[in-house]
Image (tube, rainbow, N blue to C red):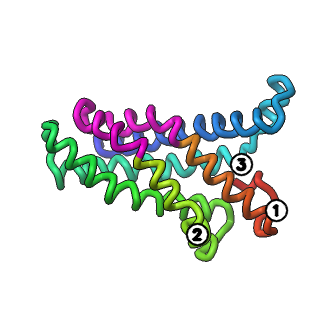
């Protein structure tokens, strides 16, 4: 029962983070395109299907994946918070957990956008390495902090706090891919995000 509650909490917090992050990403994107308008126009310009898809990724992939990934990492590397263990755990996580999650993320986003295997390969070839490189700047320091100071049951929540900015970046990455595909005729419009 406790495991189910932890899974539910991880899914709910990740869904909430992804919901908020996509709104932040769209707000930034919309402000650079057309900063005019009041509150009503603001809410009308948001792509709610894009928000919904990003929220699904948080609930169904991000939360459960990282809850179990952090547990796996503690089993493999240990729960010690010594400096050497924290560094090892950070390196193992960045070299195994994060790259695998990017595959899950880009695959699920592509499927939610209506794409198949060819589109997944296309998205991966265009965005995987640059996203992984950006993640290598953001996540090692954040994870080192989490592994040293945050108990395992709160790590997904902690990651979600840092992740607000990161997920806004990921939302932007997903949107940029769909917009670039729409210019080639593969996708009708960017509201398909």
Residue 142 placement, left or right of 13: left
Look at the image and give the residue range highlighted in magenta: 137-166
Rendered position, 37 above or below 19: above
Quarter assignment of residue 174: bottom right
- Identity of the residue drawn at 65% across and 46% down: 52
Q: Residue 159 magenta-drawn?
A: yes
Earlier sequence position, callout 3 versus callout 2: 3
| Magenta stretch, overall SS | helix
Q: Disc 3 or 1, which lies upstream in sequence?
A: 3
Mark 1, residue position: 188
List x then y, in percent, for residue 40.
83, 27
Residue at (80, 38) in percent of width and height: 33
Horizontal side of 172 relative to 95 (left or right) equals right
* Residue 155 pos. (x, y %): 33, 37
Which part of the image, by quadrant, shows the N terminus?
top left
* Image location of residue 192, percent across then percent down: 74, 56
In terms of secondary structure, where does tag 2 sit? helix
Q: Are marks 2 and 1 in contact (CB under 8 Å)?
A: no
Which mark lies nearer to you, 3 or 2? 2
Mark drawn on residue 120 = 2
Q: Gap between marks 3 and 2, in whole Å?
A: 20 Å
Question: Marks 3/1: CA distance?
Answer: 14 Å
138 or 63: nearer the viewer: 138
Q: Indicate which label's residue lies in the foreground, 3 or 1.
A: 1
Residue drawn at point x = 67 percent, y = 61 percent: 113
Can residue 84 be found in the magenta stretch?
no
Residue holding disc 3: 49
Spatial separation of the CA atoms under disc 2 and disc 1: 17 Å
Q: SS class of the residue under badge 1?
A: loop
């Amino acid at each position: 029962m406790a495991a189910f509650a932890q899974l539910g909490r991880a899914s709910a917090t990740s869904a909430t983070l992804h919901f908020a992050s996509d709104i932040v990403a769209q707000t930034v994107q919309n402000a650079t395109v057309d900063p005019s308008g009041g509150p009503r126009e603001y809410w009308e310009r948001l792509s709610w299907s894009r928000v919904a898809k990003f929220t699904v990724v948080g609930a169904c992939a991000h939360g459960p994946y990282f809850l179990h990934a952090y547990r796996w990492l503690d089993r493999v590397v240990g729960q010690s918070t010594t400096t050497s263990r924290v560094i090892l755990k950070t390196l193992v996580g960045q070299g195994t957990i994060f790259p695998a999650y990017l595959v899950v993320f880009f695959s699920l986003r592509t499927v939610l956008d209506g794409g198949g295997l060819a589109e997944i390969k296309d998205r991966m070839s265009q965005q995987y390495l640059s996203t992984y490189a950006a993640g290598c700047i953001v996540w090692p320091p954040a994870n080192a902090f989490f592994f040293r100071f945050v108990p395992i049951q709160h790590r997904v929540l902690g990651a979600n706090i840092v992740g607000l900015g990161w997920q806004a970046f990921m939302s932007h990455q997903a949107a940029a891919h769909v917009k670039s595909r729409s210019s080639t005729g593969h996708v009708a419009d960017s509201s398909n995000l």
